[in-house]
Image (spheres, grey):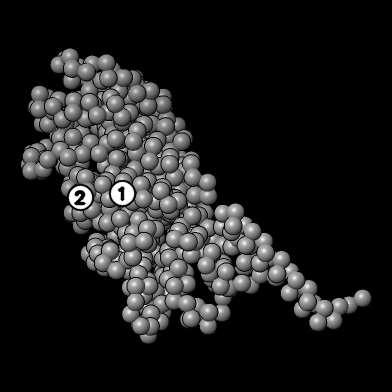
Amino acid sequence: MKKNREQIADDQDIISKLHKRASLWYENNHFILEAFYHAVEAKDIEGASRLVEGGGVPLLYRGAATPVVHWLESLPLSVLDAKPSLRVLYATTLLFLGRVGEVEKVLVTAENALRALPQNENKQNLMGHISATRAAVAVSQNNLSRIMECSQHAIENLSPLNLPVLAATKWTLGFARQMQGNPKLAREAYDDALRSSETIGHFIIIILASIGLGNIYEMENQLHLAKSSYMKVLNLDGHLAFPASAVAYLGLSRIAYEQDHMKEALDLIQEAIQLARHLNNMDTLAVCELFLARINLAQGKVGETLKLLKQASQSLQKNNFSKNMYKVAQVEVLTRLHINDIPSAQYLVQKYNLTNEQIRVHLAAGETDQALLKIESMSPASMERLILHALTYFQAKEIQKAVVPLMEAIEIAKTEGHLRVFLDEGAPMEALLKASLRFEIMTDHINTLLLHFSTKHPSVAPLTQRELEVLRLIAQGLSNHEISKMLFVTLNTIKGHNQRIFSKLQVKSRAEAILRTHELRLL
């Protein structure tokens, strides 16, 4: 028997009251998320609003951004117009879910609604919240001046009781200090933000501040501390709901790569890419693709590397991050040098003014004097710079000068587990390590590094002068027929040389032989 409308209405009223009672029970027993769900089912807008704002720590900051945004998007515009605080909360939720491009429009609407209200502490606090959210958007755009301006305005206007947003502002200031190249102040700000967030249960800033600290530790070559900071994110229940967690996976991938755990690095970067796809109007996806390109290059997959470089370039342009195209160029220079395309590499370093890569191009082109001039004008402030100093002095036959930065790099590597920073330099680094043994300094670790080289690049049988000559012509793109004519021998003789060359290089094709030649710097 069909119910009439009055019976249906009565049933719905009963259900609504039951949900309200359930919401109150859960709230009294401190199950705020469950209380919120029941308030939403009861269509209790006032109750849900109170719960979503969380008594000081809004639900979205505790990891509930997705249900909060679904509820906010279900509300009539009249409700949002009457409560500007909900619009501000909506903008912040969009930001945390990676929908960065939608945030400013919501903030402007909230700001306009607030301007019509009388001045009071609540209004001032909400204006501070708006500025804090804009500062976070500016972080996603790497806009230093905007981060500083909005963070300062937020601090001036936020209520001292608004601990969650104050913690977020400490994080944005930490990011700004990092951009300014001041790791000490950045670390202090991130530490402060993390402590505040852990005290009040601010899930999002725990993630972001942990990532920030991980970045600082990485910059300072403290891989163990960096890994611990990134792992804090992965150990949080619900972190996968927040696309920003991609940066923690990226950091862990970089560390695994540096410690030569290639499969782990690959698994982590693929997880990072999946999360980064949900971040709109940011460069995170491109940065992840670029690191995957680095992994592919280390494995000799030049075609895959170039494909990823193209994808990253398109992603940066699509999201208006053309100013970061230099990041693509940095990896492309390494790729061009890997296949001995020095002219293309030189073009890129000049176009994007790439300092470290310019030194690499000089070294690859045999322009040792120019490389010396370049390194002597800059301090060895990073592991890469230490390595470049060492390789440049070694190529200039100044072995005693080369050993000083090399030993400094090895000293760091001993405790933190760096490997790829040495292995990626190939034969020149292997030769430098062997030459440095005669100084009898840190010989145990040098021998360990040399063992890794022998594992990565097993020794090849020496090529004869004729085989080297044939290999050089193969690398120039000549066919077997053209080579036989040039060397005045039969085609079968050249084919025989090819077989012996392929066998010694442990390859199966011309393309692999050319790549192996560049890896071992045979020509």
Q: Earlier in the sequence, mark 2 or mark 1?
A: 2
Element on which disc 2 rests: loop
Instruction: Name the residue at 31% across, 46% down.
Output: 191
Asked which quadrant contains residue 5, the reply is bottom right
Callout 1 amino acid:
Asp
**Residue 241, position in %: x, y?**
52, 54
Instruction: Name the residue at 43% across, 41% down.
Output: 232
Residue wearing tag 2: 181
Classify mark 2: residues with Cα within 10 Å, few (<14), some (14-19) or many (20+).
few
**Residue 57, position in %: x, y?**
45, 59
Up the image or down, 397 lies above or below 120; here it is above
In the displayed image of the protein, which residue is found farthest to the right? 1
Up the image or down, 415 lies above or below 172; here it is above
Element on which disc 1 rests: helix
* Front in this rendered view, residue 36 or 332: 36
**Distance CA(mark 2)–CA(mark 1):** 18 Å
Task: For residue 366, say whether it is visible.
Answer: no
Report the quarter where the C terminus lies.
top left
Residue wearing tag 1: 192
* Front in this rendered view, residue 130 or 339: 130
Asked which quadrant contains residue 103, the reply is bottom left
Up the image or down, 102 lies above or below 480; here it is below
Asked which quadrant contains residue 456, the reply is top left
Side (left or right) of 350 relative to 33? left
Up the image or down, 234 lies above or below 152; here it is above
Classify mark 1: residues with Cα within 10 Å, few (<14), some (14-19) or many (20+).
some
Callout 2 amino acid:
Gly
Side (left or right) of 379 relative to 300? left
Instruction: Name the residue at 41% across, 48% down.
Output: 199
In the displayed image of the protein, which residue is found farthest to the bottom? 116
Q: Nearer the viewer, mark 2 or mark 1?
A: 1
